Amino acid sequence: MAHLISARNEKVARIAGKEIQTQTTTTKKAATRYRHDIADLTRQVCELVMRLAVVAKHPPTEMTAPPAVLEKARYRVGRVKTPRAKLGLLAANKAKLVGVSGLSLHKGEAGKPQIQ
């Protein structure tokens, strides 16, 4: 009888060992994957910190357009009225498209107060 009990105990221990190994293998794989992800994130943070240090050391210079370009970009009455006339739009229709009243557009084209 002692022999049967010891055989049963050995079989139970072997099955339990396989079950524990299966569970621990899954956990080990997950832990390895998490450590790998953490290492990747740490590398990304280090790279971003280094980039930030470079940008802080040498901030980008403010870019301005040359005066000739700025002169062309200024608001002029003809630049509002001419495209409207070419498209055949009435002042009221263009005012609706722009989002202002017809009177505001008319005044803006006449060179009075600027359209806001």
Image: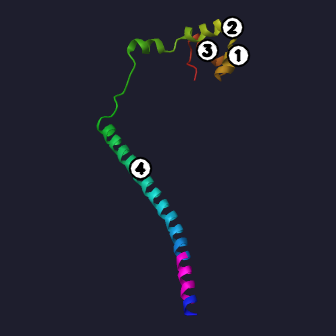
Q: SS of the residue at dot 2?
A: loop
Q: SS of the residue at dot 3?
A: helix
**Numbered mark located on residue 93 in the image:** 1
Which of the two marks, 4 or 1, is nearer to us in this view? 4
Q: Amino acid at mark 3?
A: Lys
Could you say where residue 43 lies in the image, as x and y percent from the top left? 37, 48
Could you say where residue 107 lies in the image, as x and y percent from the top left? 61, 14
- Asked where in the image residue 65 lies, by quadrant, the reply is top left
Q: Residue at x 70, y 11 (%)?
A: 90
The residues bearing labels 4 and 1 have C-alpha atoms spaced at a distance of: 57 Å
Location of mark 3 (residue): 107
Q: Amino acid at mark 2?
A: Gly
Location of mark 2 (residue): 88
Q: Is residue 94 magenta?
A: no
Q: Residue at x 39, y 51 (%)?
A: 42
Which of the two marks, 2 or 4, is nearer to us in this view? 4
The residues bearing labels 1 and 2 have C-alpha atoms spaced at a distance of: 10 Å
Q: Is residue 92 left or right of residue 107?
A: right
Q: SS of the residue at dot 4?
A: helix
**Which of marks 2 and 1 precedes in the sequence?**
2
Crowd rating for badge 2 (residues with CA inside 10 Å; few <14, some 14–19, many 20+) = few
Q: SS of the residue at dot 1?
A: helix
Q: Is residue 110 left or right of residue 41?
A: right
- Asked where in the image residue 89 lies, by quadrant, the reply is top right
